[in-house]
Image (cartoon, rainbow, N blue to C red):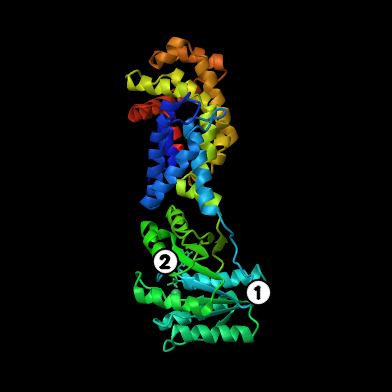
């Protein structure tokens, strides 16, 4: 999995601790990480450059408040700027015209125009209480006209027939005449796409635009298109005055960086997001949420912030250094890790914030019991002498009995703790760099 922005920035956090503001000297490293994160999310390079320049201007001199560090403060600036960039403009469909309000759908083949036409029909019927007609001007593939007929029925809208031997121009005129005479509020015009931009296609859709004078010209683009979305968007923007964007297939696993590219290149607002193949899989675009997705952060942001605020990074770093220098992981370290875990809001608090795949696996764990176990483990370690904590191998039968009595537990429990400690120690040796720091970084992803 590609590293997320919080992942990347947390690597820089150590060196920047204690710095009170974002300055020329610390911003360069951080912006490099932001740049990589955006490229990994498939935002196009020229768009990334522009964006970074804007973020830099906004970030410089930003005071780092409270327990935040410059890295976190910058994530805040980036997130806000990203949401603002993608979120400007009106989201819903503009229908403020003499009916029928015509909506022209444009985009490459396979982008999702036909599907989105039907989804929009349903949206306008249900949310805006409109009488909606659809028509297909895709005369190159007979199946395309049939496809629109089928999905229009599913949407509960009316479909105006067209045939492959007609000219798109004539279809448009006939449909608009029908819509007028039958008092439709909205006419949705689905068009042909090509696999790549070509001049004939652009000429045809320009002609349709001139004939129909649509109030909305929506550019439908596949979120999975990534970097290529830029060239497509450029071509359509040059051909047509776009009024909005529909970003489809956001249910796929792309990070959706195309949203930023397409928004920046067309200047048109992103109005809707396609989130499934089904007729109801259309959502009003939510820029805040999408910014989190592009940065690869989502709900994990809250967790990372909490961890970084509550956990003593100094202690974690000391531990990491100690392991690197060859000193073993001892029971004092184990005790300190247990303490850090408690500071992070206890096990159950932590579980609440972890991604669902993780918590599903731990679904059967009894949280209360787990927390009682942690307390008991602390009690046992605290009953040991400092020397025993550093050299657990000293703990033979008689010492174990003394520790057990001190902690008020059975000797078996002391043995169990020592086993757990050994497992942890083995893990630490393998990781060679401090479990907690690693763990925190992993939680950032
Ligand atoms: P067109 O060529 O632009 O008309 O594209 P279509 O509407 O025919 O869609 C192409 C394919 O993408 C079809 O298989 C659709 O079911 C699928 N599709 C469209 N929108 C979405 C979406 O938001 N999510 C998913 N998963 N599939 C979509
Ligand atoms: Mg189609």
Q: Which one is in front, 340 or 78?
A: 78
Q: Position of residue 8 (x, y in %)?
A: 40, 38
Residue occupying the point 48% across, 23% down: 18
Instruction: Decide which of 282, 277 is in the foreground and name it.
Output: 282
In the picture of the structure, the residue carrying the numbered disc 1 is 130
> From the viewer's perspective, is residue 103 above or below residue 66?
below
Q: Viewer-nearest of labels 2 and 1?
A: 2
Residue 263 visible here: yes
Report if the beta carbon of the residue with label 2 is closer than 8 angstroms to ligand 1. no
Query: In the image shown, does 258 or 154 lie closer to the viewer?
Result: 258
| Horizontal and vertical percent position of residue 263 | 47, 57
In the displayed image of the protein, which residue is found farthest to the bottom?
Answer: 165
Question: How busy is the neighbourhood of tag 1: few (under 14 within 10 Å), some, or many (20 plus)?
Answer: some
Quadrant holding ligand 2?
bottom left
**Residue sitting at x 35%, y 69%:** 197
Residue 265 position in % (x across, y down): 43, 58
Secondary element at image label 1: loop
- Locate residue 328, reporting x and y percent: 36, 19
Q: Is residue 95 above or below residue 324?
A: below
Q: What is the quadrant of the C terminus in the image?
A: top left
Q: Which mark is residue 373?
A: none
Along the line of sight, which residue is nearer the eye, 145 or 103? 103
Q: How many marks?
A: 2
Image: 141 above or below 87 = below
**Residue at (39, 26) in percent of width and height:** 434
The disc label shown at residue 238, or none? 2
Tell me if 200 is positioned left or right of 259 in this view.
left
Q: Secondary structure at mark 2?
A: helix
């Amino acid at each position: 999995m590609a590293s997320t922005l919080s992942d990347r920035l947390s690597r820089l956090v150590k060196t920047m601790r204690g710095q009170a503001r974002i300055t020329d000297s610390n911003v360069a490293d951080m912006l490099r990480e932001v740049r990589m994160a955006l490229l990994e999310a498939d935002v196009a390079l020229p768009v990334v450059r522009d964006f970074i320049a804007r973020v830099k201007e906004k970030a410089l001199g930003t005071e780092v408040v409270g327990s935040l560090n410059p890295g976190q403060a910058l994530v805040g600036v980036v997130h806000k700027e990203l949401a603002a960039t993608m979120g400007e403009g009106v989201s819903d469909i503009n229908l403020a015209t003499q009916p029928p309000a015509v909506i022209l759908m444009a985009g490459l083949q396979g982008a999702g125009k036909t599907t989105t036409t039907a989804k929009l029909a349903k949206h306008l019927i249900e949310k805006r209480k409109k009488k909606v007609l659809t028509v297909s001007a895709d005369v190159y593939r007979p199946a395309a006209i049939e496809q629109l007929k089928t999905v229009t029925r599913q949407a509960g809208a009316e479909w105006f027939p067209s045939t492959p031997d007609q000219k798109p121009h004539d279809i448009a005129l006939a449909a608009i005449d029908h819509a007028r005479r039958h008092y439709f509020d909205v006419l949705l015009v689905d068009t042909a796409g090509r696999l790549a931009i070509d001049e004939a296609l652009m000429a045809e859709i320009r002609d349709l635009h001139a004939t129909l004078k649509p109030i909305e010209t929506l550019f439908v683009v596949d979120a999975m298109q990534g970097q290529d979305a830029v060239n497509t968007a450029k071509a359509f923007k040059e051909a047509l005055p776009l009024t909005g964007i529909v970003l489809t297939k956001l249910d796929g696993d792309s990070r959706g960086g195309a949203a930023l590219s397409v928004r920046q290149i067309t200047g048109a607002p992103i109005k809707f997001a396609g989130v499934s193949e089904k007729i109801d899989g259309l959502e009003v675009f939510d820029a805040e949420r999408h910014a989190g997705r592009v940065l690869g952060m989502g709900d994990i942001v809250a967790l990372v912030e909490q961890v970084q605020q509550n956990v003593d990074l100094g202690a974690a770093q000391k531990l990491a250094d100690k392991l690197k220098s060859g000193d073993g992981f001892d029971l004092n370290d184990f005790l300190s890790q247990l303490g850090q875990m408690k500071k992070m809001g206890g096990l159950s608090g932590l579980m609440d914030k972890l991604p669902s795949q993780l918590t599903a696996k731990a679904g059967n764990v009894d949280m209360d019991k787990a927390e009682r176990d942690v307390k008991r483990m602390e009690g046992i370690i605290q009953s040991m002498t400092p020397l025993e904590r550093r050299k657990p191998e000293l703990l033979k039968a008689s010492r174990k009995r003394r520790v057990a009595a001190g902690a008020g537990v059975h000797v078996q429990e002391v043995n169990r703790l020592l086993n757990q400690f050994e497992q942890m120690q083995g893990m630490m040796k393998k990781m060679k760099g401090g479990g907690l720091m690693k763990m925190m970084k992993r939680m950032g992803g």
